Amino acid sequence: METTHYIWKSSKWLEFTWDAASLLALLSECRLRQAKLLTRISSLGFNYEQQAHTDILLEEALTTSAIEGEKLNRDSVRSSIARKLGLPYAGLPVDRSTDGLIEVLLDATQNHASVLTPDRLFGWHAALFPTGYSGLRKIRVGAWRGPHPMQVVSGSIGREKIHYEAMPHDQVDAEMDRFLTWWEESYGTTDGIIRAAVAHFWFITIHPFEDGNGRIARALTDMALAADDKQTMRSYSLSSQINAERAAYYSILEQAQKSDIDLTAWLQWFLGCFARCIISSENIMGLVLDKASFWYHNSQTQLTDRQRKVINKLLDAGKDGFTGGLTNRKYAAITGISRATATRELQHLLELGVIKANAGKGRSASYDLVWP
């Protein structure tokens, strides 16, 4: 049976090449979108800029886990982020692995200029798997993988398809030394977005850990992008876009890992994904800007804490995003008050001009915010 060719078996392994001319237009688009987004965020003012960064970090944490089939509780993740950043938030209890993920993502961006070492990567890995288990399986934590073959497999038992098999474990230590040396030497000498793309592919191809390689590869990608735009908080979530396009991501990754050393196709896909992730982040920024505009417009409006809580629910949902509109029953459920009190407070918000009545009366009566 013919042995599958993988890129790490090539006699020219690590002599990566690409067609720079074919990447120029894509890279220019990325740079233009990146500059516009950073300018837009900086115009928000500190409080809303911090909120924008927090929302992006929340999406990054949720989606980098979702790619691996793990669904995290949004409120729990938000609570962890708030505690790590010293922000006020009365959230849910947070499990150690969620806290660990947030620590990794923050370390990658806030300390992007710090030296990347094996011990630092081991610390990230241990933070992701604080119990020493991945699900029900005990894994080697805080160390390179052991002697078992590392394969990326899909399909049911008996019908498995091997998409990729990584290099033998006894090569990992030397390969990671080469990777970490390149990581330091490439900073400032290779375009920052290209560097992030190469780092992602190279690390995931080595596959140095028994589990968590995808999450750490994406954290490294964020670290390289933070070093490129010199921001200590993310302004866009690449993981969110990879999650939205994960079928294409796995396809191009497999294609590149089974090809020779030319990374042009992988870099083209990565740059396109990066541009699309900026567009997605602009939508999040739009929501933050809508919130900022609303509270600026209503800065002199006297509201109770209960009313503010309900309004923030509507703001978080975005324009036309609160399904069915705000009803008396929903208001009472959100605030924990009686329906009669809810009716009075809704009437007060109507009189203040903060909300407006939608079409429908009686039991079908509902309201929406008056958006500036």
Image (cartoon, rainbow, N blue to C red):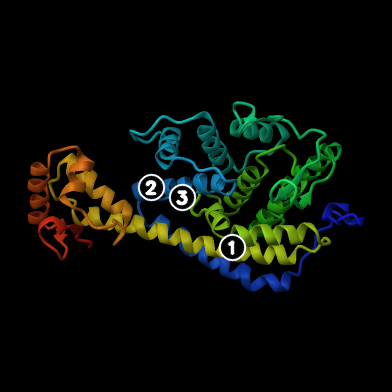
SS under mark 2: helix
Q: Quadrant of residue 193?
A: bottom right
Q: Total number of numbered labels?
A: 3
- Distance from the alpha carbon under mark 3 to that under mark 2: 9 Å
| 228 displayed left or right of 151 | left
Q: Give the labeled residue for mark 2.
A: 51
**Quadrant of the frame with the N terminus:** bottom right
- Classify 287 as above or below 50: below
| Amino acid marked by disc 1 | Cys
Q: Amino acid at mark 2?
A: Gln
Of marks 2 and 1, the one in the foreground: 1
The structure residue drawn at horizontal position 24% and vertical position 56%, both measured from the top left corner, is: 294
Please tell me whether mark 3 sits on a helix, a strand or a loop: helix
Q: Which residue is mark 3?
A: 56
Q: Is residue 14 visible?
A: no
Inspect the image, locate mark 3, and give the three-letter code of the amino acid beneath it: Ile
How dense is the environment of label 3, judged by Cα within 10 Å: few (below 14), some, or many (20 and up)?
many
At horizontal 29% and vertical 54% (from top left) the residue drawn is 292
- Identify the residue at the far front of this view: 158
Residue 167: quadrant of the picture: top right
The percent position of residue 334, horizontal first and vertical second, equals 23, 42
Percent from the top left, x then y, of residue 357? 14, 61
Label 2 close to label 1 by CB (< 8 Å): no
- Res 64 visible: yes
Tell which of 260 and 282 is nearer to you: 260
Q: Position of residue 219 (x, y in %)?
A: 61, 45
Q: How packed is label 1: few (under 14 Cα within 10 Å), some, or many (20 or more)?
A: many
Q: Is residue 291 left or right of residue 65?
A: left
Per the rendering, the mark at residue 273 is: 1
Q: Secondary structure at mark 1?
A: helix
Residue placed at 50% from the left, 33% from the top? 99
Q: CA distance from mark 2 to mark 1?
A: 24 Å
